[in-house]
Amino acid sequence: MAAIDKYFQILKEKGGSDLHFLANHPAKIRVHGRLEPISKPISDAQLQKLLREICSEQQWRRWQETGDLDFAYQVPGVARFRSNYLKHHWGIGAVFRIIPTKIKALEELGVPLVLKKFAYMRSGLILVTGPTGSGKSTTLAAIIDFINSNFRRHIITIEDPIEFVHPNKNSVITQREIGHDTESFAAALRSAAREDPDIILVGEMRDLETISLAITLAEMGQVVFGTLHTNSAAKTIDRIIDVFPEDQQAQIRTMLSVSLKGVVSQLLLRTKDGQGRVAVNEILFGSSSLANIIREGAIGKIISTIEAGRGEGMQTMDDSIKEKLEAGIISAEDAYFRAFDKSKFEKYLRKEGKADLIM
C-alpha cells in the first residue's frame, strides 16, 4: 500500500470528489463542492515522496521535464483516480479526482432519461459539455454503458487518461489512452476510421485538428461522442466554429449543420441541505431548424429552438434549474447565481428573504 493511499481512503469515506495537494499546505478534499483540510501542512520534500511512489520512472521524468503529468491511478478496493501533477510558483502540487469503480446508470444519476435517445443514433456528432467537475464524464460513461448493455457495437474510446473502465458486455469496447496507447487525440482519430468502429468517444475536443476530424468522421456516418468545456448549447456551437480560421468557418458551419445530432450541457449544483450535488442539464437535439440556424450563423435563435422542442425532451438550463428549485432540491441563491436569465429567479430570492443578493 502506497503512503498516499490513506488520503484516497479519506476522500472515499467522506464522499468527496477531489483531493488537492499543494506543497507546504494541508491536503484538502472537495466535498459537495467545498474544500476542507484533512491534514497538517505537507512539505515539498514530503509531497515529492508521496507522488513519486505511485508513478512510473517514465511518468516521473516527463513531469520533471514538462511540469505537467496526467495519468490514472487505482487503489484496489477503493476507486480509480484521475491524477494531475503540476509545478507552480511556490513548488509542486497535485489534484486527484475520484472515478467510481461502478458506472452508474442514467436513472441513478438523476439526469433526464431522454438522453437514452442518443444511444439509438447511428451517425452524427453528440457533445456532452460543462466546466471541469460538472459530471459530464460520468453522464457520458452512463450513456456508453447503456449502449454496451443493449446493443452490439464496436465502441472506441480515446481518453487522457482513461477514466471509467468499461467491461465488454454486448458490445466490444476498445479503450485507448493518450501517451500510452496512442500519440494524440488526432492520431487516434485518424486510426479509428480504419478500425471498424460504430461509435467513437473523444475524451476532449481540445484543438482544431481533433475537432475537424471528429466532425468529418460524424459526417461520414460514425457516431462520435465528444466533450467540451462549455456550459450551453449556443456557446458549444460558437466554440467549435470559432476554433477554425475565418476562411474555413462557412464550410464548417455547413458540415456541422449536417453532423450535429445533439448537445447536452451539464452543471452540478449543491443541494439545499448541503449533503450532496445534483445535475442540471440543457438538452438540444438536432433538427432541420437547428441545421438552418447553424448554417445562417443565427446562434441566438437556439434558445427558441429548445423551447419549441420541449415536447421532444429538449430543455434550457434555466428550465432545469427552475425544476430543481421548485422541487426544493436546491436553494434560490444557487439557482439565481447559476441561471442565465437571472430576472426569472429574483422572486424566489425575495421569497427566501435574500433580495439583497440581486445584482
Image: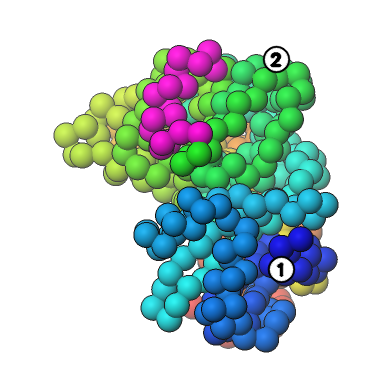
- Residue 121 location (% of width, % of height): 60, 20
Residue type of the residue flagged with mark 2: Arg
Check residue 152 in the rendering and tell me which mark sits there, or answer none. Answer: 2
Give how far apart the Cα atoms at labels 2 and 1 are: 42 Å
Q: Is residue 352 left or right of residue 133?
A: right
- Around disc 1, counting alpha carbons within 10 Å, would you say few (fewer than 14), some (14 to 19), or many (20 or more)? few
Q: Is residue 285 visible?
A: no
Give 134 or 357, whichever is nearer the viewer. Answer: 134
Check residue 3 in the rendering and tell me which mark sits there, or answer none. Answer: 1
User: What residue is drawn where x is 40% and y is 44%?
Assistant: 206
Give 63 or 359, whichever is nearer the viewer. Answer: 63
Q: Which residues are magenta?
A: 181-197
Determine the secondary structure under disc 1: loop
> Looking at the rendering, which quadrant does residue 293 occupy?
top left
- Magenta residue check for 297: no
User: What residue is drawn where x is 58% and y is 55%?
Assistant: 55
User: What residue is drawn where x is 54% and y is 78%?
Assistant: 45
> Looking at the rendering, which quadrant does residue 330 occupy?
bottom right
- Magenta residue check for 189: yes
Q: Is residue 164 left or right of residue 109?
A: left
